[in-house]
Amino acid sequence: MFNIRVYGILISENREVLVSDEFIRGNYYTKFPGGGLEFGEGTRDCLRREFMEELNLRVEIGEHIYTTDFFQISAFNPKHQIISIYYQAYALEPITAPLRDKPFHFDERQMEVYQATGETETFRMIPWEMFSPETVSLPIDKVVAELVKRRY
């Protein structure tokens, strides 16, 4: 079974990279914003939807950056192979979602989500000079972080 994921690399005018800090199924992950492709949805539409759902942010989807070209099993379901697609994303408006200074600094509302679902997320910007493959958790994201650092 394949699980197709679509993620956006958003780099601010101040050369900061947007990441999502998430608590999922008992573990902490820092990853790029995005999520799962739904049936009947194109990859760019998926990414626009994910940014709206997660950040209430309208984005323009730019160039394709990377698609997984190696076997990667899902961290959450050993019967799923992950295919991740990454695009550059540009904010069409100011980010109004709360941005944190520290990893996994969840606010009261996010903790309420955690109490209800067992999962939660928050967002932060990582300054370019501090951004590296080590700042993200997932194997495919690490490959993309390296590509982004070399390309931009």
Image: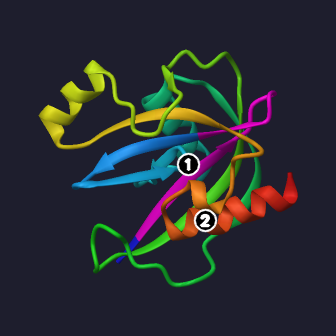
List the residue tagged with mark 2: 142
Residue at the spot 17% in from the left edge and 43% down from the top edge: 118
The residue at 17%/39% (across/down) is 117
Question: Between 134 and 47, which is closer to the camera in this rendering?
Answer: 134
Say which residue appears at 27% left-offset and 20% top-offset.
109
The stretch in magenta equals 3-18
Near mark 1 (Cα within 10 A), the count class, few <14, some 14-19 or many ≥20, is many
Measured from the top left, where is residue 42 in percent x and y?
A: 56, 51
**Measuring 27% from the left and 72% from the top, which residue is drawn there?**
77
Measured Cα–Cα span from mark 1 to mark 2: 10 Å
Q: Disc 2 residue type?
A: Lys
35 sits to left or right of 23: right
How many residues crowd mark 2 within 10 Å: few (<14), some (14–19), many (20+)? some
Residue 137 spot, x, y in % from top left: 49, 60
Identify the residue under disc 1.
Answer: 32
* Disc number lying in front (1 or 2): 2
Asked whether, in this view, residue 64 is left or right of residue 152, the answer is: left
The quadrant holding residue 15 is top right
Relative to 55, say whether 104 is above or below. below
Q: Quadrant of residue 140?
A: bottom right
Among all residues in the image, which is located at the extreme right? 151
Figure quadrant of residue 108: top left
**Chief secondary structure of the magenta portion:** strand
**Residues at discs 1 and 2 in contact (Cβ within 8 Å):** no
Mark 2 lies on a secondary structure that is helix
**Residue 51 painted magenta:** no
